[in-house]
Amino acid sequence: MSGTSFTVSKEQIIAWNPDIILIHGISPPHAISIEDVLSDPDMQTVNAVKNRNVQYTKGYAIGWDPATGLAECYYMAKLFHPDMFDDLDEEEIGDEILEKFYGVEGLYTNMLDLSDRYSWHMKIEEESTV
C-alpha cells in the first residue's frame, strides 16, 4: 500500500472469486488490460473471468471530480446489476450531470468516446449488426 492506493495479489483475487473485476483506468494504454486478465491461466477459475465480466472504471484515483464521480455511480449500477438497471441510460444521465456542473453538452459521451469503458450503446449496435 502506498498513499491512497494498494495492490491486490492475483492469489487474493482468486481467493475472493469475485463476480466482477474492475480495472482502474479508462484511457489506453493500460498497464493491465482486460485481455491480460481474461487470458491469465491462473485466473481461469475466477467467476468474473469465466463470465468475461472484467471492465475498466475511472474510479477516483485519477483525481477527485464530484461530477464524474456521480456519473460513475450510474455506470457502476449497470455493471453490478444489469438486470435491475436495464432501462437506465447511463450515458444520457452522465451527459445531464456534467452539463449541469460544467455547462457543456455531450461531455460524458465525449469522455466515453475517448475511453475503453463498457458501452451499452455499442453493445446494442453490435448485436443489431449480427
Image (spheres, helix red, strand yellow):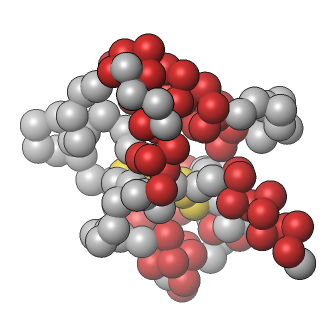
Horizontally, is 75 left or right of 129 in the view?
A: left
| Residue 96 placement: quadrant | top right
Does any portion of residue 15 appear in the rendered image?
Answer: no
The residue under the point 59% across, 55% down is 118
Task: Provide residue 41's location: percent of width, then percent of height.
Answer: 54, 85
Q: Nearer the viewer, residue 57 or 130?
A: 130
Q: Nearer the viewer, residue 44 or 112?
A: 112
The residue under the point 44% across, 14% down is 100
The residue under the point 53% across, 30% down is 95
Task: Provide residue 60's location: percent of width, then percent of height.
Answer: 30, 34
Q: Nearer the viewer, residue 75 or 1?
A: 75
Quadrant location of the C terminus in the rendered image: bottom right
Task: Provide residue 113's location: percent of width, then percent of height.
Answer: 48, 56
| Residue 75 placement: quadrant | top right
Quadrant location of the N terminus in the rendered image: top left
Q: Is residue 8 above or below residue 67?
A: below
Does any portion of residue 53 appear in the rendered image?
Answer: yes
Outermost residue, top side:
100
